[in-house]
Image (cartoon, rainbow, N blue to C red):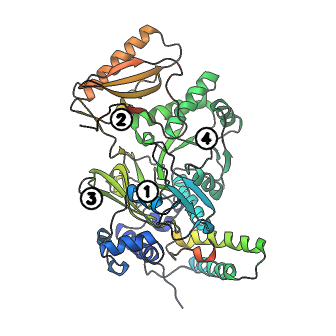
């Protein structure tokens, strides 16, 4: 299914890759069976990817409910 | 310019219509977020009869009530310590910072989540990259790293873009000068005042900063970074380019930066902020080129939504086309021009501290200065207290004082400034925000 950015423009291949990684990181962070070291790493990775997808106008949301 | 000249080529080069559409999409989400989670905005939106679904164009932004510092402070008093703006408590945060308190008022207390904190570094990356800082740079941060948010975001921004970061930390100015040279810094970050202080100290130590590896200075914290005379002096003393930036604790980071084209103004990071300029009295928008009060809406900090915050900063917006860098971001001509309430009325004449500094900085022999306003009976006095460079003879001082008084009077409708010599080390020195205007008059301005 084609994806669009916040301007309604089709996303590029690189943007799709970033979005996929971001969503997978969020899903990982939402789990309740992560060791503290894994949870901290997942949080850092999610936050880092959030900056990229937010800068590129792909997603605009906050991560408070995921502890970030 | 090529794609590599921008931190975020996709949004930095958007046309104005597309940029506005992106801002509107983010504004809707921000208002939905604030309406759903912030007790302050739930109340203020309700009182204003506003609902997020009313946002159909950016013009609808004006339906939203403005937020003042006084309201924020009242909110803190109502529910200490953070007030009613935050959407969550301290348990959700990883940082707690406060305003610098230079005005002697109760500080604003702010929280940041992990995501908010990373976003603040991201905003600094726009500015650092835009002014030409790259991975190969060694950057020295002349900052005390306290509870004032200051250069914290720059610190992490430098790490993010891969530069070698040297945290200056709390130490004497002499130690910082020696480290800048010994570590081979190519970039130095400080307030404009402290950049001058470092240069003075270097001269005292016999260190030639212009011969050092420093190529760029990142200035922030005071309007002086865009006062042409101050900037020219800093660039001459350091033999380096000086780039102005400005931010505030209320948003946690910078919202404007000067790009490497140095167009005489600072770009607004408009994919992350909406910046309005309004008449301070009426609150109505002013046009390009007109000075007014800066009102900011920030999309980045989730824990404290910030919608139409009246900053009391005085600015004049000009179109993006004023700069040849290719960014679609509008600029503030001359950066932050001062504070809306900066202007002093002395015997019927308006005196702006920024204009005074511009004149004083044309005299390179000035080590430090202070503008002192007093009242004797019904007569206002304005004195410029000057600390000349060590070793200045009485003859040289007399000549400088006469020329200073003349230049100041000519710029102020003949108003007589008393130019007084201060003793060596008598005037205060500043590492963060300088406070060089001291008004000891006991009645309100114009009273």
Residue B187 point in image, percent of width and height: 60, 43
Q: Residue at x 54, y 55 (%)?
A: B124
Q: Which mark is residue B353?
A: 2
Residue lying furthest top = B395
Q: CA distance from mark 1 to mark 3?
A: 20 Å
Nearer to us in this view, B290 or B433: B433
Foreground mark, 2 or 4, reads 2
Residue A65 sits above or below residue B255 on the image:
below
Q: Earlier in the sequence, mark 2 or mark 3?
A: 3
Q: Earlier in the sequence, mark 1 or mark 3?
A: 1
The lab-note entry on whether marks 1 and 2 share a chain reads yes
Q: Are marks 2 and 3 in contact (CB under 8 Å)?
A: no
Q: Earlier in the sequence, mark 3 or mark 4?
A: 4
Number of labels in the image equals 4
Residue corresponding to mark 4:
B142
A56 displayed left or right of B442? right
Residue B271, can we see it?
Answer: yes
């Amino acid at each position: 299914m084609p994806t669009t950015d916040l301007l309604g423009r089709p996303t590029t291949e690189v943007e799709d890759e970033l979005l996929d990684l971001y969503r997978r990181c969020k899903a990982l962070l939402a789990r309740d069976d992560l060791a503290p070291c894994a949870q901290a790493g997942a949080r850092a990775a999610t936050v880092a990817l959030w900056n990229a997808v937010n800068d590129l106008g792909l997603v605009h949301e906050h991560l408070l409910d995921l502890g970030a | 310019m090529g794609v590599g000249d921008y931190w975020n080529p996709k949004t930095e080069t958007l046309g104005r219509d597309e940029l506005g559409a992106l801002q509107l999409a983010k504004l809707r989400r921000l208002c939905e977020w604030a309406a759903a989670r912030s007790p302050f905005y739930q109340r203020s939106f309700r009182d204003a009869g506003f609902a997020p679904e009313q946002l159909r164009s950016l013009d609808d932004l004006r339906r939203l009530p403005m937020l003042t510092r006084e309201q924020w402070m009242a909110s803190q008093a109502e529910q200490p310590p953070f007030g009613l703006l935050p959407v969550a408590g301290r348990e959700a945060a990883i940082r707690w910072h406060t305003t610098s308190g230079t005005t002697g008022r109760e500080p604003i207390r702010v929280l940041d989540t992990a995501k908010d904190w990373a976003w603040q570094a991201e905003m600094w990356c726009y500015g650092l990259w835009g002014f030409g800082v790259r991975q190969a740079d060694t950057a020295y941060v002349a900052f005390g790293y306290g509870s004032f948010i200051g250069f914290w975001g720059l610190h992490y921004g430098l790490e993010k873009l891969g530069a070698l970061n040297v945290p200056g930390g709390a130490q004497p100015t002499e130690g910082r000068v020696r480290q800048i040279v010994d570590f081979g810094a190519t970039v130095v970050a400080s307030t404009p005042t402290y950049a001058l202080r470092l240069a003075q100290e270097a001269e005292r130590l016999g260190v030639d900063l212009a011969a050092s590896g420093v190529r760029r200075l990142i200035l922030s914290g005071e309007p002086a970074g865009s006062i042409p005379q101050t900037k020219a002096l800093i660039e001459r003393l350091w033999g380096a380019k000086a780039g102005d930036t400005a931010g505030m604790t209320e948003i946690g980071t910078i919202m404007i930066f000067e790009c490497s084209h140095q167009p005489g103004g600072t770009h607004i990071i408009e994919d992350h902020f909406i910046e309005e300029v309004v008449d301070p009295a009426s609150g109505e928008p002013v046009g390009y080129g007109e000075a007014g009060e800066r009102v900011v809406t920030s999309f980045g900090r989730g824990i404290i939504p910030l919608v139409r915050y009246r900053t009391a900063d005085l600015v004049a917006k000009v179109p993006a086309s004023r700069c040849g860098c290719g960014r679609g971001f509008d600029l503030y001509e001359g950066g932050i021009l001062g504070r809306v309430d900066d202007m002093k009325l002395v015997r019927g004449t308006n005196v702006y501290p920024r204009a005074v500094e511009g004149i004083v900085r044309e005299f390179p022999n000035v080590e430090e200065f202070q503008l002192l306003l007093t009242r004797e009976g019904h007569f206002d006095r304005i004195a410029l207290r000057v600390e000349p460079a060590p070793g200045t003879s009485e003859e040289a001082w007399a000549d400088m004082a006469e020329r200073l008084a003349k230049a100041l009077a000519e710029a102020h409708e003949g108003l007589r400034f008393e130019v007084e010599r201060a003793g060596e080390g008598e005037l205060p020195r500043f590492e963060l925000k300088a406070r060089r205007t001291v008004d000891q008059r006991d009645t309100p301005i114009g009273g």
